[in-house]
Amino acid sequence: MTNRQRHRNLSSDDPPIDMPQPCPICATTRGLSEHLTEVAFAAQYLGNTSTYQSEHGTTKIRTETIGAWLRLASQLKTVKIDPWKFEPTAEDASYCEPVAGSIRDHGQHYTTHATALTRFVFVCNGLEEAYRFIDHLYGPLSICKSIAKKHFKRTSSMRAVALLEELFEREGAAAAPKDFEHHCRNFIGFFNIYKAEHKVAVADIGTNTLPTYALQLVRTLRNHVAHGTFPLAPPADYGGFDDSKELVLMLRHACRVAALYIQIILKWFTTGFESHDYKAMLDAHGKEFNRFIENCTLEYVLDLHLTGNFALHDGLYSNQDLED
């Protein structure tokens, strides 16, 4: 298989089938779409709200909104780019094969990148809501830690970083999902390639031993995409970047890491499952409802990325090991 064919097979959700098999840790991790779906369901079943105050006023932040963005990201299949739109004719047969092949390759290339970028933006929107969801907790933390005014964090994203760092100081490794560092290292590795290949400027965010280092790289990447500085170029065979596949994989791993940080926020900064859907389960009778309540816990929220015999998105009657 040629490099061009491998590139065509690349999906922003899963690696090409011809790539080496994942490591044992990645083999026990849900596919990205399934992972995002599971986090979305958890946010929905939690049904928590908080108050967010900014210069624009006061608003209610809901975990369901976090979940809605992740659900949209998980359901995204393809952002289709039409490379023939501004060609003199849309008839492939009107072009010689080298020209027609070039147009098709450009369309497939930009479709792959547009899909990955759009999914990343949706995930980051959910992450932004998660920042705002816990923003009200920063004030008490700053008082408790006697944070000087000049060091006071002004944005919800940086306040979330401070809250997460305090959580890790307090809870240690128990605060993180299983294999958290492994997935963070995967993303950091791709980001380092991106930084070196494209001469990316990154603000001083501390060392990569910090538990929030990967989150701050996700924030940096989000800013590059939002501000239009993320590198776009034609396929590598037509003068584009040699690392175009790695750029797509970096976005995929960034979505994974962002979802893991959202899991941490949902586990440690919510008050439990309060949605109407969850409460309806409590009032229902039957083994399927008992099984759901037994498994749908805050402890499970840290395991949403892991494969297993239980999944919120499976519903009540799927993959059950219930005896009659």
Image: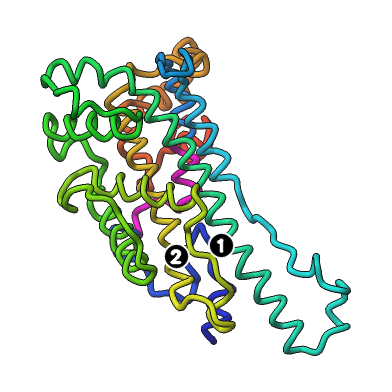
- Does residue 148 lie above or below 217 as drawn? above
Whether residue 33 appears in magenta in the rendering, the answer is: yes
At x 43%, y 16%, the residue is: 49
Q: Are marks 2 and 1 in contact (CB under 8 Å)?
A: yes
Amino acid beneath label 1 = His
Q: Quadrant of residue 160?
A: top left
Q: Dot 2, how many residues are within 10 Å of its Cα: few (below 14), some (14-19), or many (20+)?
A: many
Which is nearer the eye, 309 or 83?
A: 83
Residue 179 in view (yes/no): no
- Inspect this view and state whether residue 191 appears: yes
What amino acid is labelled 2 in the image? Leu
Residue 89: image x %, image y %? Answer: 88, 74
Residue indicated by mark 1: 113
* Magenta span includes 152: no
Q: Is residue 210 left or right of residue 110?
A: left
* Magenta part of the chain: 27-39
Position of 308 relative to 166 (above/below): below
Q: Where is 167 relative to 117, above or below? A: above
